[in-house]
Amino acid sequence: MIKFQNISKIYSKNHLGSIIKVALDNVSFEIEKKEFVSIVGKSGAGKTTLLKLLLAEEGPTKGRVFFDDQDVHKIEKSKIFKLRRRIGTIFQDYKLLPTKTAYENIAYVMEVMGYEDEAIKKDVPEVLKIVGLADKANNFPAELSGGECQRVAIARAMIHRPDVIFADEPTGNLDPYNTSEILKLLLNIHQLGTTVILSTHNKEIINSLGRRVITLEDGKIIRDEKKGRFIL
Amino acid sequence: MLTLFKKTFQRGWVNFVRNSGISIATCFIIGMTIFLISSLFLFKDVSHFLISGLQEKIDVSVYFKDTAQENDILAVKDEVSQIPEVKEVKYVSKEQALETFTEKYKDNPVIMASLAEVGNPLFAALNIKAKQASQYQAITNFLANVPQKDLIDKVDYYQRKPVIERISSISATVNIIGIIFSLILGIVAVLVAFNQIRLAIYNSREEIGIQRLVGASDWFIRGPFLTQGAISGAMAGLATFLVFGFSVFLLSSKFTILFPGFNIFSSFLSKFWLYFLIQLFAGVGLGVLSSIIAVRKYLEV
């Protein structure tokens, strides 16, 4: 379903002219439909870069990224939204719309997808309840804690039942109780047939999952195991 | 389609209300721009009034020799009236000229005594008014070639030429300055309004990026910004129309003292709908156009 083929990403120059950082170095792997894959690595190992490349937010320096056999970087800019609608993303920095409430942030994705008002009014409160934020529906992101924002981001990523969920450090700001709740949620979504890519550096989560683990270090894949553990 | 339009409008309205600080600032800037553009329109009316007032005051007189018969003079009058540049031709007979002269100098005994001695020394004349000061030369050239040219004693264009040319050049200069001034002010005003909207959208650049990443299409993102721009423009247009109309009403009496015979409020009322539509469409147009250009820049993600 998703294929990273000989991907290298080099951030060559900043605005002052120098600093070369190799974020990904000749990375290749494939993710099958309905698979649950964890990507682990230290901060700066290249996990978020993988997400940016998959969403075509950035282009690779070398190599190609395929989604259902389509090279995502060959899709026209004006049509890229079709790909992005198939991927529910939980961003590390949440990326919530600051001028919209928790309810509106989640409803926005459904509006984008063209859902009817009735469906939005029915689904959004349900999802808010699932992530434990029913009483914060009318709060703006600035009025929510980091963990609450993260849960809104999770609710937003799954509300439209996308083909793939890419969760970039979804439990980074959560306490152990909420962490296990979110993990359960991701597993449930996966049970329903959604492909899940979980990027994290939480050892307990990875070890409790017992599923495929891709380990990144300095932009390279150092391990790709079917039933992996967190080894760094 | 209608639902989509309604939803887009709702989202634009919510944006407008939630960003009320920026929205009011944008309305204010667009309003100032429209006010300036409307003032230029009114200035054009004032300058037109002044120039035509000056042009009204000048004419050329063609004096005929005593041998010229009234029929000949009227024939010249008919021919001159045919020239497109001529606005008005007035025949003044020898007797009428004397009457006007006597009326004017009746309190001057020396002149009156001289007049009694020499009889009527005045000539019959045609007073010609052109549509524009620059056209007198052409009319004078025409007179030099009429069949009755031998009956003409003199054309006083040549005595008045410097004054006429000066007025003609002042009219042209005022027009050119007016156009340049309007253009510069218009461009500055549009740029300021555009920049204000760009700044407002610049604040939303992060939001636009997020909308792109969660799968919103370009038009889904643009729609509310364009609506917001249109709402700001329409509100600015309506508010400016009221403020402008009221200002013109208040200034009207002061203007009448400065320029007797010219009432700016009447001039405004005579073009009421034109002003209303110009202000409304200038506001909406400015708001929408600036939004389109500004959003475009941040749709790159």
Image (cartoon, coloured by chain):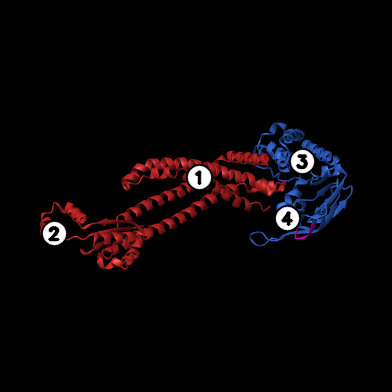
Position of residue B187 measured from the top left corner of the image (x, y, whole percent): 49, 55
Chain letter behind tag 2:
B
Choose mark 3 or mark 4, whichever is in front: 4
Q: Judge whether B163 appears above or below B256 on screen.
A: below
- Quarter of the image for residue A139 reads top right
Label drawn at residue B72: none
Q: Residues within 10 Å of mark 3 (few under 14, many from 20)?
A: many
> What is the distance, in whole Å, between disc 1 and disc 2 at their CAs?
64 Å
State the residue position of label 3. Answer: A160
Question: Drawn colour of chain A?
Answer: blue
Q: Amino acid at mark 3?
A: His
Q: Nearer the viewer, residue A179 or B133?
A: B133
In the image, residue B126 lies in the stretch drawn in magenta = no
**Of circles 3 and 1, which is in front?**
1
Q: Where does residue A223 sit, x and y in percent of width and height?
A: 86, 53
Judging by the rendered image, the residue that carries numbered circle 2 is B119
Left or right, B251 with reference to A160 = left
> Magenta region: which residues?
A58-64
Q: State which mark lies toward you, 2 or 3.
A: 2
- Residue B284, position as x, y percentages in the image: 55, 46
Q: Is residue B271 left or right of residue B111?
A: right
Q: Earlier along the polypeptide chain: callout 1 or callout 2?
A: 2
**Mark 2–mark 4 distance (CA, rounded to whole Å):** 98 Å
Q: Are marks 2 and 4 on the same chain?
A: no
Q: Amino acid at mark 4?
A: Glu
Mark 3 to mark 4 CA distance (whole Å):
23 Å
Residue tagged 4:
A76
Considering the numbered disc 3 on the image, is that residue within a helix, a strand or a loop? Answer: loop
Disc 1 element: helix
Which tint was used for chain B?
A: red
Do tags 3 and 1 sit on the same chain? no
